[in-house]
Amino acid sequence: MTFADLELPDRVRDTIGTELCLLPDPSADVDRALTRYHRIFAALPTELLQQIMDFGRHNDAPGVMLVRNLPLDEDLPPTPVDGEPSPAKASFVAEGVLLGLTGLLGEPIGVLTEKDGRLVHDVVPVPEGARAQTNQGSAVFLNFHSDITYDTTGRYDVANPDFLVLNCLRGAAGNDAFTYYADARDLCRHLPDPLVETLRSPLYRLNAPGSYTRSVGEDVLSEPVPILSGAARFPEITVSANGTRPLTRGARTALDALQDACRAVAHAVRLEPGQALLINNRKGVHARSTFRARHDGRDRWLQRTYIRRNLWNVRYRATSEDRRVHY
Ligand SMILES: O=C(O)CCC(=O)C(=O)O
Ligand SMILES: [Fe+2]
């Protein structure tokens, strides 16, 4: 599948940046902030705006889109080292870019077990998580995966985000961090039919995300699920970074072949400040290379949202404190 790549004209970047830098921290009133961002992002040229909206709405759209030449915060404080928001961040341009793009795709959601339910996630290398299969890692390859959500129903691919946006505030100091995306349509074309057939069978149990298993201290496996599902033209894929357990030998062979195929078909992006990656979390799987992290305030810094097209289908998980935050 094509990899979509958009660039804002300088004039539009500057207009959006000037307006965003006047706005306060969106977390105080997210719906009001999203409304303001909506007005601001309406300044995008029609063609660009439609390409982003079409990315969100159409089944046959690409699974990943890079948006370049976005505005930046003028004074960026040191990269936080704990995965928490930086208390020193005094302007909110990056948050505005992230939530402005998010609003073109759907609704940002929080999950209590992921970044304390915040809507804006700071994705930074954390010393204790350096070797973990989570967004805190740096010293290990973060395997091709979907962002999944632990759920008592035993299905982790239902309440999980439809989309992720990753907005880059600071690139890796060694320029060595790559994000990869492998589209399930490409994977199905690449793999022999019998292996695709196996991957379409409920022969796999997914381990819950590392952020959840860390809190309970043990692996928590899903019910047996297929890795690929849905119409042949529009396959959905679900893989856990934290471990996908094949239930048969054949299932293992197909899973190994899938991992190789991901590396073969993936698009690689080295995110730089002013670039955001829009990721469809159902049409493909993503991964991240190892990269050098020093935990000295100059490390790579992304902000991320989890997005649902619609909040209705996840209402069974809604918390009573905040209508965008789910347990
Ligand atoms: O750091 C990256 O490029 C991607 C990390 C990741 O998988 C995520 O944030 O969901
Ligand atoms: Fe991820």
Image: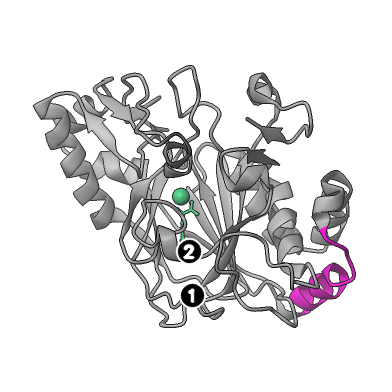
The answer to whether marks 2 and 1 mark residues whose Cβ atoms lie closer than 8 Å is: yes
Q: Is residue 182 above or below residue 168?
A: above
Residue lying at 17% horizontally and 35% vertically, measured from the top left: 254
**Which mark is first along the chain, 1 or 2?**
2
Image spot of residue 146 (x, y percent)? 42, 42
Residue named by callout 2: 126
Instruction: Verify whether residue 22 appears in magenta.
Output: yes
Image spot of residue 174 (x, y percent)? 41, 82
Q: Residues within 10 Å of mark 2 (few under 14, many from 20)?
A: many
Image quadrant occupied by the C terminus: top right
In this rendered view, identify the residue nearer to me: 86 or 284.
Answer: 86
In this rendered view, identify the residue nearer to me: 146 or 116.
Answer: 116
Residue lying at 57% horizontally and 60% vertically, measured from the top left: 83
Residue named by callout 1: 295
Tell me the kind of residue under disc 2: Val
- Quick one: SS at disc 1? loop
Horizontal side, residue 26 vs residue 69: left or right? right
Image spot of residue 197 (x, y percent)? 21, 25
Q: Which residues are magenta?
A: 11-25
